[in-house]
Amino acid sequence: MAARVLVLGGGGREHALAWKLAQSSHVQQVLVAPGNAGTACSAKISNAAISSSDHSALAQFCKDQNIEFVVVGPEAPLAAGIVGNLAAAGVRCFGPSAQAAQLESSKRFAKEFMDRHGIPTARWRAFTEPEEACSFIMSADVPALVVKASGLAAGKGVIVAGSREEACRAVQEIMQDKTFGAAGETVVIEELLEGEEVSCLCFTDGRTVAPMPPAQDHKRLLDGDRGPNTGGMGAYCPAPQVSKDLLQRITNTILQRTVDGMQQEGTPYTGILYAGIMLTKDGPKVLEFNCRFGDPECQVILPLLKSDLYEVIQSTLDGLLCASPPVWLGNCTAVTVVMASHGYPGDYTKGVEITGVAEAQALGLEVFQAGTALKDGKVVTNGGRVLTVTAIREDLIAALEGAKKGLAAIKFEGAVYRKDIGYRAIAFLKQPRGLTYKDSGVDIAAGNLLVEKIKPLAKATSRPGCNVDLGGFAGLFDLKAAGFKDPLLVSGTDGVGTKLKVFRAASQKLIVFVSLLC
């Protein structure tokens, strides 16, 4: 029997979740609460007028509507204990418990947890008194310039200061001016890390970790990383800065170690684990944890999921993720770009008509709506981040160009969007790389292993007159002792890296080398 599922939230992330779930043959209908204009009128997707804050009423709604499971989009319901409360009422919910969600809802808890379990992160201190925090900032032997409200602050509670004085002013705003209310009663002061920031997410059933392709978000409003911080203006996936080996390292030392640590502490973690990571010269370090999909990361990661999302969630809830890990599309890149209202992230106007969504979709693009509503049969703006345009193409540049065509097709007055999403990756890909034999298909390590294996056979061919070490570059062959009559002896040597030195000496002007080994 086809299932009905409920997605909680009303942003682009929730539209993407509903869109992916609706592709499943197991799913009859996806309800979204409260949803937006994009989730209001699809064939298998519709909005539901039910609040996520009243857990008892929500549980009864799920029973009345025969909901198979609930997927929680934003962080606030998770921190409020929705997973445990729905479970107590017999309703399955995809996400971590309130205790496990402290990894996001309390930055102090997260930092203490990482220290307990040896998870790499920035050096830090937590304070409940502003004077003590400022004293630490001014005297610390590290650049203590990152000021964080410990509690949930709708993604706005992190301030990266340009000086120690500015960091102290941030402490005053958070702790004395109550900019973020109760979320700022405790502040975490961190060392400023340098490097590339990436988003590494995974599905987890509490034991098994199934990593997703790494992504990179763009927080600043304007091109060139200018303007104020936002909830995110675009993202791309996969991030080429994270190699397969590096992703495996992150999976082992951060994601798996976090899940194992939660299990050891009696608070098993199930759902989505999101690690914001800085790639420093000393290796990857955790900036923060989120306990759900990011926005706009969700809109750029899910389109690359080849597996059935419904089946992945069921496997996660059943504790069977190890038996059926998700499969991802290969040899392609996704780019998503946010279109925002004029004035965002400050005050903005609502009710502005939006046109061109169908035209963008006709270009083979996905349009995930966020701050939108239906008014008199028209789609209008209803939030700061209005929608995201996602393109999947064979490479990053093609995907960005595809997204730009969709952005040009969609119109609403005052629209703001970035045109340089992915610029860091493009610069990274253009960097000259050192050429190695392995890059060209010659594995020296494998060759050395083969030599070790055939040494006994080679030694067995030794004969009188031959005096040479295996693998050496010179030897002695006594022709008389060998018993030859008028022989012709030809000899040659070769070495690993000789042609590479010629290539580099030629300033990389030589394009092709052909190596003939006889």
Image (tube, rainbow, N blue to C red):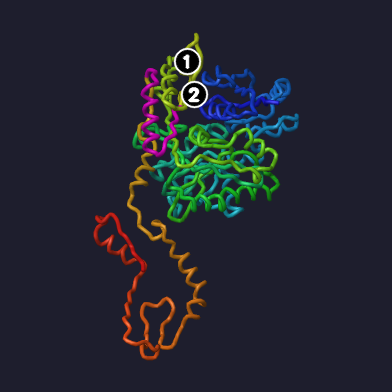
**Image position, residue 17 (x, y; %):** 56, 30
Query: Does the CB distance between marks 2 and 1 fall below 8 Å?
Result: yes
- Residue tagged 2: 369
Residue in view at x 51 percent, y 14 percent: 374
- Is residue 174 something that shows in the picture? no
Occupied quadrant, residue 414: top left
**Image position, residue 233 (x, y; %):** 43, 32
**Image position, residue 479 (x, y; %):** 36, 87
Q: Is residue 464 left or right of residue 62?
A: left
Q: Looking at the image, which is closer to me, 317 or 515?
A: 515
**Image position, residue 367 (x, y; %):** 47, 25
- Amino acid found under the numbered disc labelled 1: Val
Residue in view at x 56 percent, y 39 percent: 290
Looking at the figure, which quarter contains the N terminus? top right
Residues in magenta, as a range: 388-413
Q: Residues within 10 Å of mark 2 (few under 14, many from 20)?
A: many
Mark 2 or mark 1: which comes first in sequence?
2
Residue in view at x 33 percent, y 63 percent: 515
Q: Residue furthest front?
A: 485
How far is the residue under mark 2 from the one under mark 1? 10 Å
Occupied quadrant, residue 305: top right
Badge 1 marks a residue whose secondary structure is strand
Q: Residue furthest right?
A: 89
Q: Looking at the image, which is closer to me, 403 or 160?
A: 403
Q: Which label is found at residue 379? A: 1
Looking at the figure, which quarter contains the C terminus? bottom left
Residue 396 vertical placement versus 349 (above, below): below
